[in-house]
Amino acid sequence: MFETLTAGAQTLLWLGVGLVMASSITLHRLSRVAARAVARETDAAPRRAAELQDVALEREQRAWAPRDLPRPLTASAGSRAAAVLDAEAARAALRQAALEQAMLARAEAQKPPSIDTARTARTASADSEYARMGYVDDAEIEAHVRQLLTRRAAGE
């Protein structure tokens, strides 16, 4: 067992040494390449741009210009195309107004009732015999208990 531990540790030690050596060689090569690149930049003298044309030419004056395109018929007032566009715009405005009116009507229908309407409905429903159904007060409980005791005393 001890031999395995020492042999394994020795193997790891030699692998580490080999990895360090390979890394140092790679770093040394990279530094030499960087040093050469710096040396080339400093050695290179700025060159003067060579003229490609030995004769100076005059710039041409352009006499031609593109002609204007005709304006669309929809831009001129009174044309048939402008009338069609105006009619379409009017239809779109009517559609939008109808949509807004329908939305207002729907919002009005979904609006909760006013407080006065709810109070009036509550007072009207309080008069019915079923209005107090489910609501039991102390007097009603006491009357019920007295009735049960009276029936029990009577032997029912």
Image (tube, grey):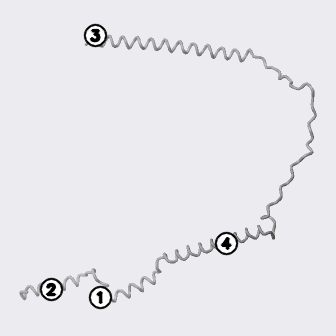
- Looking at the image, is mark 1 or mark 4 nearer the viewer? 4
Q: Looking at the image, tell me whether mark 3 or mark 2 is earlier in sequence order.
A: 3
Give SS at disc 4. helix
Q: Looking at the image, tell me whether mark 3 or mark 4 is earlier in sequence order.
A: 3
Amino acid type assigned to the residue bearing label 2 in the image: Arg
Q: For this view, does 88 lie left or right of residue 23?
A: right
Query: Which residue is labeled 1 in the image?
Result: 129
Query: Which residue is labeled 3 in the image?
Result: 3
Query: Which residue is labeled 2 in the image?
Result: 146
Give SS at disc 1. loop
Amino acid type assigned to the residue bearing label 4 in the image: Arg
Residue sitting at x 50%, y 15%: 23
> Is 35 in front, or is 89?
89
Query: Which residue is labeled 4 in the image?
Result: 91
- Looking at the image, is mark 3 or mark 4 nearer the viewer? 4
Amino acid type assigned to the residue bearing label 3 in the image: Glu
- Does residue 138 lie above or below 103 as drawn? below
Q: Looking at the image, tell me whether mark 2 or mark 1 is earlier in sequence order.
A: 1
